Amino acid sequence: MGRFIAKAVILGALVLTTTACARLESGHGYVPEPSALEGVVVGRDTKDIIGLTLGQPGTRGIVDDLGWYYVRSDYERFLWRAPVEVDRQVVAITFDEAGVVRNIERFGLEEGRVVALNRRVTDANTQGISFLRQLFGNLGNFDPATLINEN
């Protein structure tokens, strides 16, 4: 009987040690797949079409609603630590005053710097780039616990 208890304790300690080292990954937000973005025609498609085909964005332009931003963040955590953001992707779709797609750009992080991963534009300057810098500037400053209202 004593050997059985000792084996059970050792097995339990081994299971706890192994699971404590497990890495958990999770993602939050939504970014359309590149194949879905290929179907969008710059200069022809409108906000209504984008809303139906890609879905509504997580964030819109603050001042004039001429920019739609789809944001996805990936997190990694170990059981004993708080989540750490390891990647962020942003798809920025800008519209002209008539609501027609003007630019489609995909941004990501490379070595902590914002880089354009894919770009289909009708003009050279991305409007709302300061907003994108704000989105990426908060990398690692997000605490998922703030979304949960704990009293």
Image (cartoon, grey):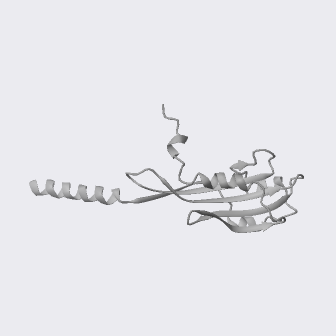
- Extreme-left residue of the structure: 2
Along the line of sight, the residue nearer the viewer: 134 or 89: 134
Along the line of sight, the residue nearer the viewer: 93 or 34: 93
- Extreme-top residue of the structure: 151
The residue that appears at 73% across and 63% down in the rendered structure is 105
The residue that appears at 65% across and 51% down in the rendered structure is 134
The number of discs equals 0
Along the line of sight, the residue nearer the viewer: 19 or 1: 19
The answer to whether residue 29 of the structure is visible from this angle is: no
Q: Is residue 113 left or right of residue 95?
A: left
Answer with the quarter of the image where residue 115 lies.
Answer: bottom right
Position of the N terminus by quadrant: bottom left
**Residue 41, position in %: x, y?**
83, 65
The answer to whether residue 91 of the structure is visible from this angle is: yes
Along the line of sight, the residue nearer the viewer: 47 or 105: 105
The residue that appears at 48% across and 54% down in the rendered structure is 84
The residue that appears at 42% across and 60% down in the rendered structure is 23
Q: Is residue 32 left or right of residue 94?
A: left
**Residue 59, position in %: x, y?**
70, 49
**Residue 60, position in %: x, y?**
74, 48
**Residue 32, position in %: x, y?**
68, 61
